Structure formats: C-alpha cells, structure tokens
Image (cartoon, rainbow, N blue to C red):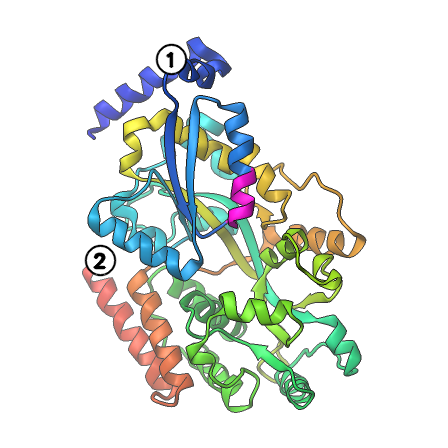
Amino acid sequence: MRKSAWWQRVSLWCAAAAVAGASWAGSAAASSPVTVTLWSWSPLSTTMQKMVAAFEKAHPGIVIKPQIQPSSTYWTSLKAAAASGTLPDIIGLSAGVNTQLYRPFLQPLNSFAARSWGSNWRSRFPLAVDHQMLLGNPKGNHNVYMLPEEAEVLNVWYNRQIFKKLHLAIPRTLPQLVKVSRALDKAGYIAFFQGAEAANFDQWMFMELADQTDQTGMLEAQIGKPTWTQPGMVRAMAAWKQLFTDGVIQQGALGQFQYPTGANLFAAGRVGMMLLGSWWLQEAELPPPQPAEVKNLQAFGTFPFPAITPGGHPSPYIGGIDVGFGLTKAAKAHEAAAEAVLKSIVSGRMEQQALNTLNDLPAFAGFKPTIPLTRHLNALYTRYLKILPHTISHEIGNPVIGQALVNAMQGVASGKLTPSQGMASVNAVAIQQEKSGS
C-alpha cells in the first residue's frame, strides 16, 4: 500500500474511533465479528487462552484465533506459510534474526506505536529491548516491524536441592564449574544440559562467553561488523570447546534441544544446571501435575555464568526481547481489529494475563504481576526486574551471520573445526554480508 493510501486509511480509522470511542468493539459486535489470526510459540497455549478470553470479553466484536506451537515446529510452520502466502494476521517473533527473515511480510509499526503510546513511545521499553526492535534493519531503515510483549534476562539456573544434597557451592570460575559438573555426573545427574541442536541457545551461550572476553567485539558483531576473529572472540570459542572436552556439557548435546527435552529433565530433577532465562519463572504457574518444589520454584536458583579466564569476572547479564509480535500484510484486510489485539498484547489486558502466569518480565513500563507470589518467587522476580534495565543485548541482527555462528559452534564442538577455523568461517560470512549491504 502506498504511503498516502496508508495515511488515508489511518485517518479514517482514527475518525471512526473518535466517534465510537471505546465502543468500537461493541459496534462491530452488532454485525459479524472480525476474526484475527495469531500464531506464535510463546506464550504457552494455556496462557494464550487466558489472554484471548480477557481480550474478547472487552472486545465482543473481535474473535482471536490463536495457534501456539512448540518453538521448533512453529518456525517450520511459519516458513511454510510465508512461502505459500498463507501467513496469519499477527505472528510471534524474536528480535534480530527472525524479525529480519520475515520483514518482507511485515508492516512497519512506527505510526501505530506513536498513535497508541505517544511520540516518545520507545522510552517505555528498557534499553536492550529498544535496541533490539531495530536490530538487523538495513542501513537507513528505521522502521519497527515487531513490538515486544515481554522481556527476558538469561543466566544459569540450578537445582538448589541437588546442590545442597551433594554439598556443592555455586561455581564462580571455570575450574569450579568443571569440579561441580564432575560431582554431579558421579552422583548420576546430568551436570549441565545444553540443547546444542537449538540455534538460539547456542548463540546465547557464545554471548555468555564472548561478553567476558570481548564485549565490545561481540556487540559490534551483533550489528554485522566482522569482529569474529579478534583474540577475545576466538578465546570465547575455545571456552565453548572446553565445556565439551572437560565434561561440563552432556554427551550427545549436539543432537538435543533445550525444549522440550532439557526443560523436562530439569523440571524432573535430573539436571543440575541449565542456561535458561527469566521465563523459567512460569513453571510456578503451570498446571499440574508438578512436584511442589517445582510449583513454587523452591528447588531452583540462579547465578551468572562463571568466569572463564583466570582473574576474570562472571558473565554480565544478557537479555532483551523474549517474544514480540508483528502485523503481517495480511492483517490489512481488518487492520483496526488486528491493531487492537496487538496493542492489548503489548500494553493491555492480554499482557496482564501473560504476566499473571509469570510468562516472563514486562517489556512495557508500568506493568507487573498482580497475583500473590511466594517469598522465594518474589525474590527471584524482583531481582530480574532490577537487572533488566542493565542487560546487554543477546541477539544477532543478520540471520545469515547468526546461522554461520551456529554452524561454527557445532563444528568446533564436534572436533571438525578448531576455534580459530570456526571464527574465521563466521568472519568470512560477516565480511561478505557487509560488502553486499545485507
């Protein structure tokens, strides 16, 4: 749609909204309800059902038809729908790589956001979240194609009960991590579960390491700079390899996923440590059957990834957007309804319902759960809220470079590549992408 036609449509919608006020949905209810289709991997299906019910109660003229799938299945379905021209109206997106993959099918949301929350709307999001909304855009493109629903902070989660039983202390250095891992293995537990088949968790693990050894280089790499062969970046890849050779990461990790395999094992008390994020808080609100120690999260605690160099510091907290949503071009057929749903997801009834299931942290300022929390759970949640404004971005903007990093990590872990060779392969892709302007 041409810009003039877009603004004309927006003007007509605004005029109608001004006349009808809050009764837009009610007037729509007098005729046939409008159906808005929504696909995502997050929030969970049970959470989404509560979100949809809350929205439809307040907007009887709009029906939301959600489809929530496991992450790996979702991205496969989304790719197929894009290829066949059958995308839904609203799609769940992570920042950077996946937003850029689907950018040709998405509508710019800047004008919608300004109408919804004012001209300074970006100030309502934490810095890492704000940064990631534009991550990966071509040079000079300042459009926002996805709006964050919730934010996340990553760290290591561990089973406090297992650690107490085995008299283990939280590891602060790599040698301590190796020692703890061996004790866990000896006792029959999976020491540190890494679903190395999952691209996002591989990338996040690399950032945990590289933000210790070359944080500047890592941040530049996220926006497409060819800094992958700098000494600190190579040291990070060498540390990744060491996690395998020293037996920290479990055997067979390259063929396993963090979800559902690792998460299920962790919840069942068979794993000592995992790289997860603030979204693990939602375990406290999942439906039964769950052991009491999982239900109240009493069994779990967190710590930053240990220092990988002598005299170094543990990893800084990384994070940003957990899940965001974009309007596809298909939504133009009933844009006002789709926009009403999107606004509710970001800053309305739907987001409140998500927060009340502890799906993750609020991305939009001023929101928090309104349900009672146990003392331990409240301490975990409050700590994450304090950390969130200071997190370092955890996403790569260019999908081709992101995949090159995953390929290199898997090649190094399997012994097919040395750390230097792996990083050289990623850097070559970054240089190629930079030259092509991608």
Q: Position of residue 243 (x, y in %)?
A: 53, 84
In the image, is 160 to the left or to the right of 44? right
Residue at image position (39%, 84%) is 412
Q: Position of residue 94 (x, y in %)?
A: 42, 53
Residue at image position (64%, 42%) is 356
Q: Which mark is residue 435?
A: none
Look at the image and tell me whether residue 139 can be seen.
yes
Q: Main secondary structure of the magenta part?
A: helix
Find disc 1 in the rendering and name its residue. 16
Secondary structure of the residue carrying numbered label 2? loop
Seen as rendered, the residue at the extreme top is 19
Q: Amino acid at mark 2?
A: Gly
Position of the C terminus, as image quadrant, is bottom left
**Quadrant position of residue 196:** bottom left
**Quadrant position of residue 170:** bottom right
The disc, 1 or 2, on the residue closer to the chain's N-terminal end is: 1
- In the image, the segment drawn in magenta is 43-50
Query: Of tags 1 and 2, which is closer to the observer?
Result: 1
Secondary structure of the residue carrying numbered label 1? helix
**Quadrant position of residue 91:** top left
Residue at image position (54%, 71%) is 262
In the image, is 207 to the left or to the right of 167? left
Q: Position of residue 308 (x, y in %)?
A: 58, 81
Position of the N terminus, as image quadrant, is top left
Q: Position of residue 430 (x, y in %)?
A: 29, 68
Q: CA distance from mark 1 to mark 2?
A: 42 Å
Find disc 2 in the rendering and name its residue. 437
